[in-house]
Image (tube, rainbow, N blue to C red):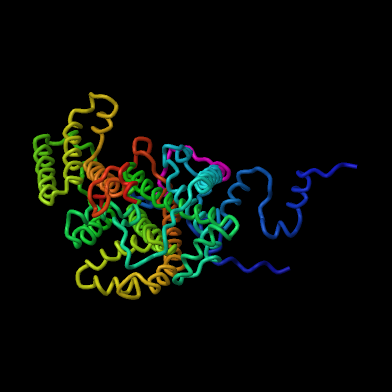
């Protein structure tokens, strides 16, 4: 009797009618199947089926946009469990930080991962912007995607900033106070804008609740919408563009 | 057996009935239909395996960071006890540093607003029509005058507000722009500088300024936003 190997188990699994109802394409290594893997999968179909080989080189993009997206995935994956342990109220918010450190299993690790992931995401987004700029990748036909990218950068900063208040320690309170005092200087609407942001005239429990809702619901939803457009447009605009010397793009904008 | 009803013209495969259309592709057409001589590879596995590796590398890096360094946590928020100095998150410290020199409206609203607008309109502002390096193929005398003029106005402006943290880097970038002239015969760095276009020089100026201001705001500012050395800062806190 043959001992069943893992390979034959996999082969049997892929032949079952349940598996075939989920994944319709075959499993043999053909280019047709490789195409189907990409465009029959909701999560992979943001990719084109074929990509230029040179765009895979490290120096083409330095993978900076990718690093930023991985950070976003890590932030969602750690942010949701953190919400289980967090109450956006005073002084419970601060107590929850202590509980994360001393009571919750691996709570401090979860918080650290969220914190450093956030810093890396802001930093990665900045560097990604600079890479795109110095490679001239904002030029036609990618103008609009650059603008979407600027929105994403601003959203990333807002996300990081609203998250900064949530631990409700001195660092958070005064960091946010300094920032929202600047909002007051906006002409005409300054005071109203600040009141709207904080739910009062100073950083208080209302501000904590507003920042919490912005941080966990409003801003992530908006960010994901813009991110969807951003990634979709990469494909529609002809793929990622690297250093100009190996990708001569000639445009005739002045032609009618 | 009756014959199938004739296909409507739309579904017909007969080239006489439905002639094949020929499209004229203009140079500014959608990039995805432009011809290219580049070599293509399948996204699966070539791209996707790289994305998986990237994911793992970043997650491992963050895990190590999270195991070694703890996120900061100070005492509970206290509205009546203002820490000195009270600092914003690091990415806003360049702005907070500007607040030290300029009125709040300029540092907190005008300059950040202009930066965001300037970034957003980059692809639509065709300020460098020749799209070539700054000095190459341009009127050197005109370029010299323009660079010297704009740089002196900026340095005088920042100097007038005693904002040396911005004036000195501005002068340095202007100096680098002049050094780039004829740099195509120089070393590696000079050659790289000689290739920079005007928009790239402007961005470089912005990046240098933002970096210097952020580093000063983060490491060189103590009580009352006075200048301190990073190693003495620890004593105060």
Identified at 51% across, 45% down, the residue is: B68
Residue A250 visible from this viewpoint:
no
Q: Position of residue B42 (x, y in %)?
A: 55, 43
Residue B105 visible from this viewpoint:
yes
Identified at 46% across, 47% down, the residue is: A67
Left or right side of A12 for B233: left
Instruction: In the rendered view, tell whether residue A17 sits above or below residue B231.
Output: below
As rendered, which of B91 and A7 lies closer to the eye? B91
Count the labels in the image: 0
Residue A224 counted in the magenta span: no
Q: Position of residue A108 (x, y in %)?
A: 53, 55
User: Which quarter of the rendered picture does the N terminus of chain B lie within?
Assistant: bottom right
Q: Position of residue A8 (x, y in %)?
A: 78, 45
Instruction: In the rendered view, tell whether residue B142 sits above or below residue B7.
Output: above
As rendered, which of A72 and B80 lies closer to the eye? B80
Task: Report the magenta residues as a range.
Answer: B31-49
User: Residue B100 lies in what quarter of the image?
Assistant: bottom left
């Amino acid at each position: 009797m043959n001992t069943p190997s893992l390979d034959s188990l996999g082969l049997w699994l892929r032949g079952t009618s349940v598996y075939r109802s989920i994944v319709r394409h075959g499993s043999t290594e053909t280019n047709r199947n490789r195409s189907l893997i990409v465009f029959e999968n909701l999560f992979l179909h943001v990719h084109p089926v074929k990509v230029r080989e040179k765009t895979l080189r490290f120096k083409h993009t330095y993978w900076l946009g990718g690093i930023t997206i991985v950070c976003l995935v890590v932030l969602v994956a750690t942010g949701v469990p953190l919400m289980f342990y967090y109450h956006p109220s005073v002084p419970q918010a601060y107590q929850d930080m202590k509980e994360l450190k001393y009571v919750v299993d691996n709570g401090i690790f979860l918080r650290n991962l969220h914190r450093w992931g956030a810093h890396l995401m802001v930093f990665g987004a900045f560097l990604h912007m600079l890479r795109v700029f110095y490679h001239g990748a904002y030029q036609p036909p990618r103008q609009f995607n650059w603008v979407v990218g600027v929105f994403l950068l601003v959203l990333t900063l807002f996300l990081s900033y609203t998250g900064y208040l949530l631990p409700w320690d001195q660092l958070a309170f005064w960091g946010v106070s300094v920032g929202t005092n600047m909002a007051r200087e906006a002409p005409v609407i300054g005071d109203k804008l600040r009141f709207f942001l904080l739910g009062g005239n100073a950083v208080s429990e209302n501000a904590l609740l507003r920042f919490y809702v912005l941080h966990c619901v409003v801003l992530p939803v908006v960010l994901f919408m813009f991110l969807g457009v951003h990634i979709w447009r990469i494909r529609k605009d002809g793929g990622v563009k690297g250093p100009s010397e190996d990708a001569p793009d000639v445009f005739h904008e002045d032609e009618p | 057996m009756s014959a199938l009803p004739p296909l409507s013209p739309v579904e017909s495969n007969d080239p006489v009935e439905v002639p094949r259309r020929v499209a004229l592709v203009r140079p500014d057409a959608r990039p995805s239909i432009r011809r290219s001589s580049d070599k293509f590879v399948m996204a699966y596995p070539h791209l996707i395996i790289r994305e998986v590796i990237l994911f793992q590398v970043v997650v491992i890096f963050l895990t190590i960071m999270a195991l070694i360094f703890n996120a900061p946590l100070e005492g509970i928020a206290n509205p009546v006890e203002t820490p000195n100095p009270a600092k914003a998150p690091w990415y806003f410290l360049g702005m907070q540093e500007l607040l030290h020199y300029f009125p709040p409206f300029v540092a907190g609203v005008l300059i950040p607003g202009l930066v965001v607008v300037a970034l957003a309109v980059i692809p639509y502002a065709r300020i460098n029509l020749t799209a070539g390096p700054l000095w190459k193929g341009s009127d050197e005398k005109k370029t010299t005058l323009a660079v010297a003029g704009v740089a002196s106005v900026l340095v005088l402006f920042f100097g007038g507000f005693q904002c040396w943290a911005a004036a000195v880097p501005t002068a340095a970038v202007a100096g680098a722009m002049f050094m780039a002239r004829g740099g195509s015969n120089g070393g590696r760095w000079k050659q790289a500088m000689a290739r920079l276009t005007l928009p790239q020089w402007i961005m470089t100026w912005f990046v240098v300024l933002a970096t210097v201001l952020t580093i000063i705001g983060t490491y060189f500012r103590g009580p009352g936003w006075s200048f301190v050395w990073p190693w003495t800062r620890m004593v105060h806190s």
